[in-house]
Image (cartoon, rainbow, N blue to C red):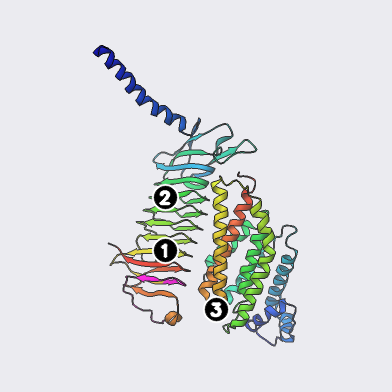
Amino acid sequence: MSTTQLASRIRTHVTAGLLAPGLLLLAASPALAHRLEKHFTVEPRAVITIHNPNGKITVRAWTKHEIMVVANHDGSKVEVTAEQTGNRVDLRTEQFAASVSPDDLRADYEISVPEDAELQIHDDSGEVTIMNVLGDMNVETVAAGVVVSDAAGYLTVKTVGGDFQCLRCAGRLEVSSISGSFKLVELRSYYVRAQSSTGSILFDGEFLPNGIYRLKNYSGKIEVRFSPGDSFDLNAKSLKGTVNNDAKLTPPAHPQKYNNSKFGYAIGAFNAGRAKVELASFDGTINVRKRD
Amino acid sequence: MATIRCDEFANYLEPWLAGERHPDAQSHVRDCPRCRSLVEDLNLIQATARQWGGEQVEPPARVWTSLRAKLEEEGLIREAGRQRRWFNGWFTILPRPVLAGAYLAVLVAVGFGLSGPVSTRINKARWHDSVQATTMGINKQIAPQISNTTSSLPQDSKSVVTASLRQNLDIVDNYIQLCEKSINEEPENELARDFLYDAYQQKADLLAQMSDRGGNVQ
């Protein structure tokens, strides 16, 4: 075999070796064969509703007064509809066939919205990601996790088992779940209410003066981090669990009846006690930790 | 002229609902329109609960309004705003089909609250008995409806949503059991009562979601 023939054979094998995994990947990827792209011109404070049984929903804010929807789905048994009524745009994954599997219902959405848009999202399973939207938002899921970053509106999130993560949010926040865990990081909210049954809750944000922060779970861990300059009035109770508190608290002027109680508690003011922090757990552990 | 005050009448509520008519209570109900209205509402709820299992029921708004007012007045509800939203939430979900289970969960919470320390004089034994009577009785009534609701969900274990709903219902049921156990041990424990109250709310929400999804997801 000549050197040229040998080199040619090697090239063929290398090319085949490179192509084969690529082809395999293509064959293995979900068949999201149908793509829908639509643009809607809207007025300020437009409302976007999304109903999707299964799939990934990503919403980003941009500076245009326009909503752009890109939806990918397997079109054999479902269809994505996008309709505008006045200043509201409704997106929905519609089911055609009488009997469909959860995978058949899958549709993924990429949506760009004006910053002040209001969102109402219902996504049973999959994932919801929202970035830089400043309007009010309501998100409901069963198993889907929810990640919101750089939001500023009134945010309500309700999941059954999905986790929730909020980064740099500034509006009023109400979140509830049964088994989902919450991470609330770098928050600047005046009102936070988070309640889960078995999920853990992490609050690593600012306690704003006159702010109210209520975190409650049944089991699991509640962890709150504070800085030396924070000012809050703490009321932490765990009926069957323990409360570990690093904050040096000034006891209340009128001591409460928990003084002789069997359950774990930490009650009192840290600095001037300007924010109100209420932590409650049935048999979980509550940690109030100084931020590193 | 009424022989007892409204706050004293609250102590006669439970026996009244059980059919006992103390002369003082009768006299008070005759003379006090507010308590008379409350009694009428509670009678309506009792009657509705008995009929439950048949057709869908929808109590009038004034039932919730007066119950809420009573619970707030008795100090059983400390955050008026929150409770108002809670009841409003119930209102929006009540008309939905197959929600008798959820509706009765409200009755449990309300009945539970009403059977509690209606005055500051807390009687542990009474608490214990009334908690058991209320929750066990109504739980028995709820059971078949819950079974219908859960069985209406497809059995396909591949569905993440169905699996999640079932799994979380188990979590909430377990949560309710432990809360009730805790209350039985310490009937006057307010924190435990709060948790039980939350658990029933979660269960009702979950049942509503399950009934909505029954047959829609496979």
Seen in the picture, residue A120 relative to B168 is either above or below; the reply is above
Query: Left or right: where does residue A49 sit relative to residue A98?
Result: left
At a point 41% along the width and 38% down the height, the residue shown is A64
Which amino acid type is shown beneath numbered disc 2?
Answer: Val
Q: How far separated are the C-alphas under marks 2 and 1? A: 22 Å
Q: On what subunit does the disc labeled 3 rest?
A: B
Magenta-drawn stretch, dominant element (helix, strand or loop): loop
* Residue sitting at the far left: A3
Q: Where residue B99 sits: x, y (%)?
A: 66, 57
Q: Circles 3 and 2: CB distance less than 8 Å? A: no
Q: Where residue B111 sits: x, y (%)?
A: 64, 71
Q: Which mark is residue A221?
A: 1
Q: Where residue B217 sits: x, y (%)?
A: 60, 44
Q: Where residue A256 sits: x, y (%)?
A: 44, 80
Secondary structure at numbered mark 3: loop
Question: Depth check: A98 or A185 in front?
Answer: A98
Q: Is residue A51 magenta?
A: no
Residues in magenta, as a range: A236-255
Q: On what subunit does the disc labeled 2 rest?
A: A
Secondary structure at numbered mark 2: strand
- Closer to the eye: label 3 or 2: 3
The residue that mark 3 highlights is B188
Seen in the picture, residue A235 relative to A194 is either above or below; the reply is below
Seen in the picture, residue A259 relative to B105 is either above or below; the reply is below
- Closer to the eye: label 3 or 1: 1
At a point 68% along the width and 74% down the height, the residue shown is B38
At a point 33% along the width and 77% down the height, the residue shown is A250
The residue that mark 2 highlights is A148
Which amino acid type is shown beneath numbered disc 3?
Answer: Glu
Which amino acid type is shown beneath numbered disc 1?
Answer: Lys
